[in-house]
Amino acid sequence: MIFHTPILAMILASVITSIIVLWSAFFALKVVRHWDITSGHARQLTLEKRTYLVTTALKFVLALELFSLILFVTNADQMAPMFTGAMCAVGVLNVNEYGMPALLLKLAVFFGASVWLILNHADEQGRDYPLAKHKYALLTILAPLVLITSLIQFLYFYNLHADVITSCCSRLFVPEGKGLQASLSAMDPMSALYMLFISFGLLVLLAFWLRGSKRNNRFGRALFGPVAIGFFTVAIIAITSVISSYIYEQPHHHCPFDILKWQYGYIGFALYIPLFTGTAFGLAAGLMSLFPTPSSLLEAYPRMIARNITISAVLMTIFMAFILLAIGRSHLILFG
């Protein structure tokens, strides 16, 4: 299995990413300890010169990690016929104990990499690298996560064996089962929809309030990050417990992975892409609001945060539009 072409590509990408991120993390420690833009010391000049190289390499490998998540899930779905009992990505991810942890870690890397890239873009707008210490401090946290993810992903691929009988979504995402998947499936559909629309309303209201606020409301903008994460969590719950059933037009089918298949018009991509990217922009806005406004970006920095909040709200609105489309065109009647 490990010689499967997409698997080799993902392993190679993770090795390249790990090497560059580890090298960059050592550089990041030097930046966090010694960076002083007002200094003319040779060490500072060396750090500034190396920043260009490190940043360029990081932008490439972290962008690669964003696409790696999509490849990881789609590859698992395409490999389902190779395993007894697997009908979609869920069965392939459950072939061994490393599959689901690898997916969750890759999700964490996706958000971490997205936030770092957005923060780096803001830093590049200033003439004096005003966010250098912040973005490299974030990198020291992101680097161990990337390395652990690469290791768990390799262990998952290395331990893939075709002679294993696995469990798929028809056995995991059922209210009568045990575990997190069963708990999500068993949630009352009406409650899940109420939670989804209320949390979306709170997110949009907060975005409009912050946009209309004339003063630099750092607390409100910092609050947008947790609100975005809260909406993301509720959205995943709603997709699993009720939205997926509308898409499949079957009240007992709750798999959040099958909606990525061609049989359902790839609507899962239309849901997950704006949801994930919108959450990333919301997280970035919340994190950036925790930092003092740089003197070189007194006017631009608040606008960047406001733009990230707007992008997040727009993407979440697109997500909700596809949710309504999925419900509206479904022949399944769950209420009334």
Image: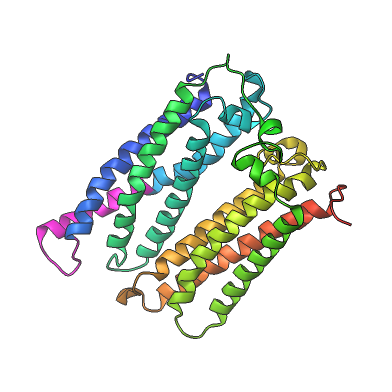
Tell me, yes or no, if residue 17 can be seen here.
no
- Residue 158 x/y as whole percent: 45, 22
Q: Is residue 184 above or below residue 3?
A: below
Q: Overall secondary structure of the magenta stretch?
A: helix
Q: In the depicted view, which residue is nearer to us: 77 or 84?
A: 84
Q: Is residue 197 visible?
A: yes
List the single residue furthest toward the bottom: 214
Whether the magenta-drawn stretch holds residue 172 is answered as no
Residue furthest toward the left? 41
Image x and y of residue 114, in percent:
46, 53
Q: Is residue 27 above or below residue 261?
A: below
Left or right: residue 262 versus residue 296 is right
Q: Position of residue 119 (x, y in %)?
A: 40, 60
Q: Residue furthest top?
A: 163
Image quadrant where residue 65 sits: top left
In percent of the image, x 82 and y 43: which residue is there? 249
Q: Is residue 208 above or below residue 123?
A: below
Q: Quadrant of residue 227?
A: bottom right
Q: Which region shows up in magenta?
A: 35-58
Q: Is residue 2 above or below residue 272?
A: above
Task: Give the side of residue 52 with respect to residue 5, left or right.
Answer: left
> In the rendered structure, does residue 51 fall within the stretch colored magenta?
yes
151 with respect to 275 (left or right): left
The quadrant of the picture occupied by the C terminus is bottom right
Residue sitting at x 51%, y 57%: 280
Please state which of residues 227 and 133 is positioned toward the viewer in this rendering: 227
Q: Position of residue 115 (x, y in %)?
A: 44, 56
| Residue at screen point 59% across, 60% down | 231
The residue shown at (58%, 54%) is 233
